[in-house]
Image (tube, coloured by chain):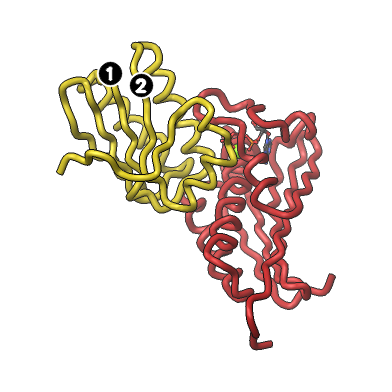
Chain colours: A yellow, B red
Amino acid sequence: MVNVTASGGDGRLRLSLSGELDHHSARDGMTRIGRALDDYMPRECVIDMSGLSFMDSSGIALILRVYRRMRECGGRLLIEAPQNQPRRVLDASGIDRVVKIQDTVKGADK
Amino acid sequence: MKKENYIRLEFPSKSVNEAFARAAVACFAAQTDPTLEELSDIKTAVSEAVTNCIVHAYPQSIGKICLRAAILEDNSVEIVVKDWGRGIDDIEKAREPMFTTGGDERSGMGFTIMESFMDELRVRSAPGRGTTVTMRRKISLRGKRAG
Ligand SMILES: Nc1ncnc2c1ncn2[C@@H]1O[C@H](COP(=O)(O)OP(=O)(O)OP(=O)(O)O)[C@@H](O)[C@H]1O
Ligand SMILES: [Mg+2]
């Protein structure tokens, strides 16, 4: 199960993920993310991973899909605060060559 | 190498079993007194191998997956994931980073992740007959352990 919470506005979208992101949960996760991208039409999208306890390569594919959507409209994607296990998967995939990864949560709107 | 202990699981290729499979192996592998990082690496590799059976081996149907995990006498964890599905035509190519036959829902990084998280990865496959992935990870000996 992966949970997606969208927040933000004014050209910014924060997607807070929690739970486990694998092939089983990815399709549902992507549907929710797609809907949030349609609703907010952000110029900057932040994927907050601080609540995500597990991710495998299905998460890499999901991030790449969000990245392509953001790029199509000239927007920017950022990954924030991944826990250790997702961080190791991100590193092994080399995705930091296309998407910036920030270690801490910055400006989380509470 | 001698097996100190082992488990054997069989389950249908339903995606809901991905979380079960990796959690079950992690629970078993905990006997080797691994670090959190070692344990999560094993969990990730199992998730990759099992997902490949579900996504690629049996794309249009539900088939059988057999998962074995063993603790060897050198305190390494060996994992074997076997399916009787479609098989892989060109294993060398399949193992290349970013190679995928799965479209944009896949990234082609599964084997790369298994390879970098485990000490050893072997893939055997016969087109139309199935695939067996064998992985091994040595668990560091920390302090003294009970036998
Ligand atoms: N058990 C299997 N049965 C049949 N084909 C497989 C199997 N495992 C892997 N393959 C083939 O090898 C390719 C590469 O696998 P790999 O796990 O590296 O990437 P992927 O599954 O395509 O994407 P990702 O793992 O990033 O989601 C797959 O696209 C598929 O063609
Ligand atoms: Mg894969």
The yes-or-no answer for disc 2 within 8 Å of ligand 1 is no
- Say which residue appears at 63% left-offset and 81% top-offset: B143
Mark 2: secondary structure: strand
Q: Is residue A73 above or below residue B16?
A: above
The image position of residue B4, as x and y in percent, is: 74, 78
Callouts 1 and 2 close, C-beta under 8 Å: yes
The image position of residue B83, as x and y in percent, is: 69, 47
- What amino acid does circle 2 point to? Arg
Count residues near mark 2 (Cα–Cα under 10 Å), then give few for <14, some for 14-19, many for 20+.
many
Q: Is residue B123 above or below residue B140?
A: above
Residue lying at the far top of the rendered structure: A73
Using the image as rendered, state which of residue B61 and residue B109 is in the foreground.
B109
The image position of residue A68, as x and y in percent, is: 43, 19
The yes-or-no answer for disc 1 within 8 Å of ligand 1 is no
Q: Quadrant of the C terminus of chain A?
A: top left
User: Which residue is denoted by mark 1 in the rendering?
Assistant: A43
User: Which residue is denoted by mark 2 in the rendering?
Assistant: A76
The image position of residue A89, as x and y in percent, is: 54, 44
Q: Is residue A81 left or right of residue B30?
A: left
- What amino acid does circle 1 point to? Arg
Residue lying at the far right of the rendered structure: B1
